[in-house]
Amino acid sequence: MPILENIPDAVIRSEYLRDAAETLGIDENVLRRISQLRPSAPADDPGGEFNPAERRLLQILFENPSLRAPLLEELGEADTKGLNSEPVFRIIRGLFRKEKDLIFQDLQREIGPALSRRLSQALLAKGRPATIEEARDCVCALKAQARECELRELQARIARQDKEGGAMSVLLKESRTCLRQILALRNP
């Protein structure tokens, strides 16, 4: 069971579980129950779950190759900075720039088992067929989230400048610009 549980890809792990049950001549459900009773959160998994926008956008990118180009052109590196899925998006963008196919097994080798496990779970939770509008909504949500993080950083810098008695006009201007961008992204 520990060997099977260390397989990060949920689909492949399920296939091996089925094969093991068949080879051992026991009910597959028994093995699944044993697997569920064991502690599942490994200590080397510092990240958290994907937020709904990043999870859905990853599903769309994997399921709809025709939507990749317009979406990846809209989604910049700064838009995914700090997300749990940031390494995944970075690799996907790199493959896109090199005009290479997006193959889960290749990506899996580069991101490690913990992130690979979360990505597998996100991709297995399939939803309705994607539309370009839904995908763009996800991109807008991620962009807004990135701008909100940027705004918090600016506000912290403004507070420090205020305590130190420094000039804040440039920071205030950046803050207003960032706030306008957030509002535009949240209310297109």
Image (tube, rainbow, N blue to C red):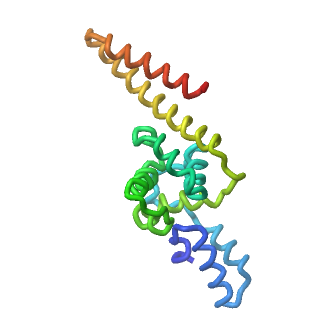
**Is residue 148 found left or right of 129 in the rendered image?**
left
Q: Residue at x 59, y 56 (%)?
A: 64
Screen quadrant of the N terminus? bottom right
Viewer can see residue 162: no
Q: Indicate the position of residue 172 as horizontal and vertical percent values.
A: 37, 14
Q: Indicate the position of residue 171 as horizontal and vertical percent values.
A: 34, 17
From the viewer's perspective, is residue 18 above or below residue 183? below
Q: Indicate the position of residue 39 as horizontal and vertical percent values.
A: 57, 64
**Is residue 93 found left or right of 186 in the rendered image?**
left
From the viewer's perspective, is residue 24 above or below residue 28? below
**Is residue 91 found left or right of 29 in the rendered image?**
left
Viewer can see residue 58: yes
Q: Residue at x 66, y 80 (%)?
A: 18
Q: Residue at x 62, y 44 (%)?
A: 132
Q: Residue at x 58, y 73 (%)?
A: 13
Rendered image quadrant of residue 16 = bottom right
Rendered image quadrant of residue 175 = top left
From the viewer's perspective, is residue 30 above or below residue 185? below
